[in-house]
Image: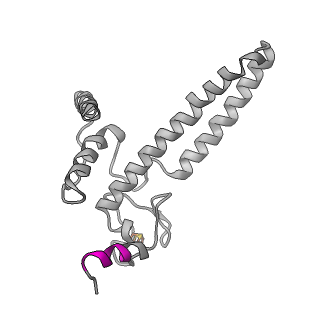
């Protein structure tokens, strides 16, 4: 209930900033409750979303920025701790690393997971054996996929095993 209210509040704020003109996810894609939540979260999680073939975040980008920020921060903290003899405040250093490096990476990963769920519900590529979930790209053509871009246009699509297994529970495809 509280989460729903906060999402609505965030959406209103984005609306005031003119950032809510985004693609709508069909309600039939998933269960109605999940779909509604995603539609509410989508503008909040992707306020700068543009329907372009390059994904906003991937596991690779999260790990790269994590390592870059961690490396720089360790150097800066090491310099400050040595320069001002702050060794007894090492816990503060850990807190700074958590705030600047670990927590943002965790939040990015949560956004990435939502982005993956949106692709799974709305694209052909997500059900193809050539789709790479960690980078949101097509392994066959080595191109990124998005809600609005299917690199092969559907011509090279092949059902992945997981999709076939899910399918066995419901309809049968020939
Ligand atoms: S082969 Fe086509 S459908 Fe499959 S992931 Fe690549 S672009 Fe998407």
Q: Is residue 70 above or below residue 58?
A: above
Q: Is residue 34 magenta?
A: no
Across and down, in percent, residue 110 comes to 44, 44
* Image quarter for ligand 1: bottom left
Task: Specify the segment rendered in magenta.
Answer: 164-171
Q: Is residue 102 above or below residue 167?
A: above
Residue at image point 74% right, 29% down: 75
Q: Quadrant of the N terminus?
A: top left
Residue at image point 25% right, 35% down: 4
Q: Is residue 80 above or below residue 133?
A: above
Residue farthest along the bottom direction in this orientation: 174
Residue at image point 61% right, 25% down: 95
Task: Judge left or right: residue 138 versus residue 94.
Answer: left
Q: Nearer the viewer, residue 26 or 172?
A: 172
Task: Judge left or right: residue 109 versus residue 151.
Answer: right
Q: Nearer the viewer, residue 145 or 172?
A: 172
Can residue 30 be seen in the rendering of this structure? yes
Task: Judge left or right: residue 9 versus residue 132.
Answer: left
Residue farthest along the top direction in this orientation: 84
- For the stretch drawn in magenta, the main secondary structure is helix
Q: Quadrant of the C terminus?
A: bottom left
Task: Judge left or right: residue 5 versus residue 59.
Answer: left
Across and down, in percent, residue 15 comes to 22, 31
Across and down, in percent, residue 128 comes to 40, 72
Q: Is residue 29 above or below residue 82?
A: below
Across and down, in percent, residue 124 comes to 33, 68
Can residue 47 be seen in the rendering of this structure? no
């Amino acid at each position: 209930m509280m989460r729903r209210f906060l999402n609505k509040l965030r959406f209103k704020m984005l609306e005031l900033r003119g950032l809510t003109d985004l693609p709508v996810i069909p309600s039939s894609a998933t269960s109605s409750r999940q779909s509604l939540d995603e539609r509410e979260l989508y503008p909040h999680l992707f306020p700068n979303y543009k329907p372009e073939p390059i994904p906003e975040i991937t596991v690779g980008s999260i790990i790269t920025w994590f390592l870059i920020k961690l490396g720089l921060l360790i150097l800066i903290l090491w310099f400050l701790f040595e320069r001002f003899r702050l060794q007894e405040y090492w816990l503060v250093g850990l807190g700074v690393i958590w705030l600047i490096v670990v927590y943002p990476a965790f939040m990015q990963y949560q956004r990435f997971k939502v982005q993956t769920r949106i692709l799974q519900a709305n694209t052909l590529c997500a059900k193809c054996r050539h789709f790479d979930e960690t980078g949101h790209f097509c392994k066959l053509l080595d191109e990124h996929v998005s809600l609005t871009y299917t690199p092969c246009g559907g011509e090279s699509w092949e059902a992945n095993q997981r999709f076939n297994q899910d399918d066995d529970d419901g309809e049968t495809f020939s």
